[in-house]
Image (spheres, rainbow, N blue to C red):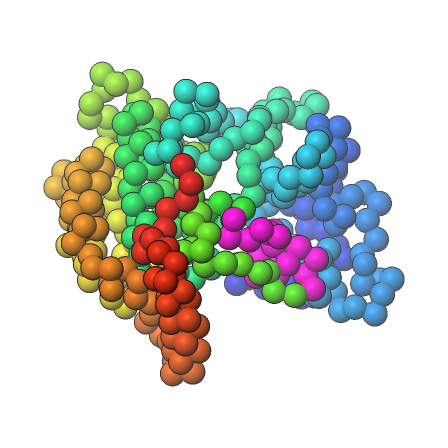
């Protein structure tokens, strides 16, 4: 029995589920395009635990997909691990175009652009409605845990900057909730990790080794433009019929299908993500409460624009002391043992960072 996002699946680990079969059946096509899937998805796959004394749960090829539309692969031209996303054009007609727009030469190099880079998009033989979008391998933005408030502040800055950048280019994300915010793990995890069991190394033989964000600052990205829309600059107040994303708390969607401004909804999404993942789950983020409260107001017309959010956040950031920025982020449910262990390791790092002049707000290379 395996577990996928909390749901029990009785399919034996050596049996591919229908989502996996889809990828297995296109193994050769993808290989011809220059992308090699993991052994589990080869037509010639023999489960490694069948020829060894290892428990299937401890084997790399025993890990089942969490999301059927996304699979990792190795780019054969340079050995880089990438993500392949399957997109049905009929279901999401704008996704590839918007993603490629932000990956265009004119926009890709701009530091404020936090849309996931797209390396290429191609179709499969005989499946004109299905596209494969190739992107870097990313991981959830809040994993590993945040060590200091300075690390969290830099995360907020990048997210606000990135959504502001999208809005300036007249694109509303429309689903920028926490599971659509990722980070580039290249520097944090120099040896990477298993794409499914992300706490383990690539071979699932031990923990994935990583640094803190202060040591190796990551860049954060927005993903999944499946319901995003791009508007003409002349349309200064677009209205869209509500379409549900992953966050089910949007006030203007609760009891009405009245068209509303998707840019204001984006402000709610990103504000609510910070509320749920930081203000409620961790201690010490009171300094963000007034701004977040304004972003998640019930009346979308009363919410600030992303330009206003960025300006207000700049003021907040300037008001934080070095002591606060270097302080440890404490989880709300942290027990005494965890507190002692994490505090000791934190202070050891903190003293070293101060001695070496490492910035309290760590930003990635531009």
**Front one among 20 and 200:** 200
Q: Is residue 47 left or right of residue 191?
A: right
Rendered-image quadrant of the C terminus: top left
Q: Would you place residue 265 above or below residue 45 in this image?
A: above
Q: Residue at x 46, y 21 (%)?
A: 105
Q: Residue furthest front?
A: 355
Q: Which residues are magenta?
A: 187-205
Asked if residue 201 can be seen in this view, the reply is: yes
Residue under the point 40% across and 80% down: 340
Task: Depth check: give the residue in front, 269 or 331.
Answer: 331
Q: Is residue 5 above or below residue 135?
A: below
Question: Magenta-highlighted stretch: main secondary structure?
Answer: loop
User: Could you tell me which residue is drawn at 16 percent across and 47 percent down?
Assistant: 315
Furthest toward the bottom, the residue is 336
Q: Is residue 256 visible?
A: no
In the displayed image of the protein, which residue is found farthest to the left?
Answer: 302
Q: x and y percent of residue 318 in the render?
A: 18, 50
The answer to whether residue 355 is left or right of residue 316 is right
Displayed quadrant of residue 265: top left
Question: Which image quarter holds the N terminus?
Answer: bottom right
Q: Name the spot of residue 320 as percent of width and height, x first.
A: 20, 57
Q: How far across and how far down the image is residue 140, in percent?
A: 47, 51
Query: Residue 191 colored magenta?
Result: yes
Answer left or right for 328 relative to 237: right
Residue 350 magenta-highlighted: no
Query: In front: 326, or 20?
Result: 326
The answer to which image quadrant residue 34 occupies is top right
Mark count: 0
Q: Residue at x 45, y 59 (%)?
A: 212
Across and down, in percent, residue 283 comes to 28, 68
């Amino acid at each position: 029995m395996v577990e996928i996002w909390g749901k029990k699946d009785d399919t034996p680990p050596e049996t591919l589920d229908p989502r996996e079969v889809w990828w297995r059946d296109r193994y050769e096509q993808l290989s011809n395009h220059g992308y090699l899937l993991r052994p589990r998805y080869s037509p010639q796959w023999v489960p490694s635990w069948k020829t060894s004394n290892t428990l299937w749960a401890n084997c790399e090829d025993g890990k089942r997909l969490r999301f059927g539309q996304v699979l990792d692969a190795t780019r054969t031209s340079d050995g880089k691990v990438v993500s392949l996303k399957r997109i049905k054009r009929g279901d999401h007609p704008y996704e590839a175009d918007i993603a490629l727009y932000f990956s265009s030469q004119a926009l890709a190099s701009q530091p404020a652009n936090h849309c996931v880079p797209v390396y290429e998009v191609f179709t499969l033989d005989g499946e004109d409605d299905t596209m494969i979008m190739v992107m870097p391998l990313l991981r959830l933005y809040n994993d590993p845990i945040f060590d200091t408030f300075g690390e969290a502040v830099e995360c907020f800055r990048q997210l606000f900057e990135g959504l502001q950048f999208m809005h300036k280019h007249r694109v509303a994300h429309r689903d920028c909730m926490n599971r659509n915010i990722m980070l580039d793990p290249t520097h944090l995890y120099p040896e990477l990790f298993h794409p499914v069991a992300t706490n383990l190394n690539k071979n699932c033989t031990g923990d994935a080794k990583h640094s803190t964000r202060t040591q190796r600052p990551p860049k954060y990205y927005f993903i999944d433009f499946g319901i995003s829309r791009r508007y003409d600059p002349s349309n200064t107040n677009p209205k869209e019929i509500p379409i549900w994303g992953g966050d089910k708390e949007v006030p203007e969607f609760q009891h009405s299908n009245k068209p509303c401004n998707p840019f204001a909804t984006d402000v709610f999404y990103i504000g609510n993500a910070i509320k749920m993942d930081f203000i409620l789950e961790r201690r010490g983020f009171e300094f963000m409460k007034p701004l977040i409260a304004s972003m998640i107001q019930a009346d979308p017309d009363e919410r600030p624009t992303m330009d206003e959010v960025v300006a207000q956040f700049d003021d907040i950031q300037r008001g934080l002391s070095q002591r606060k920025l270097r302080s440890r982020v404490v989880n709300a449910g942290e027990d005494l043992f965890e507190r002692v262990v994490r505090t000791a390791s934190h202070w050891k790092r903190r003293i070293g960072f101060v001695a070496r002049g490492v910035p309290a707000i760590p930003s990635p290379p531009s």
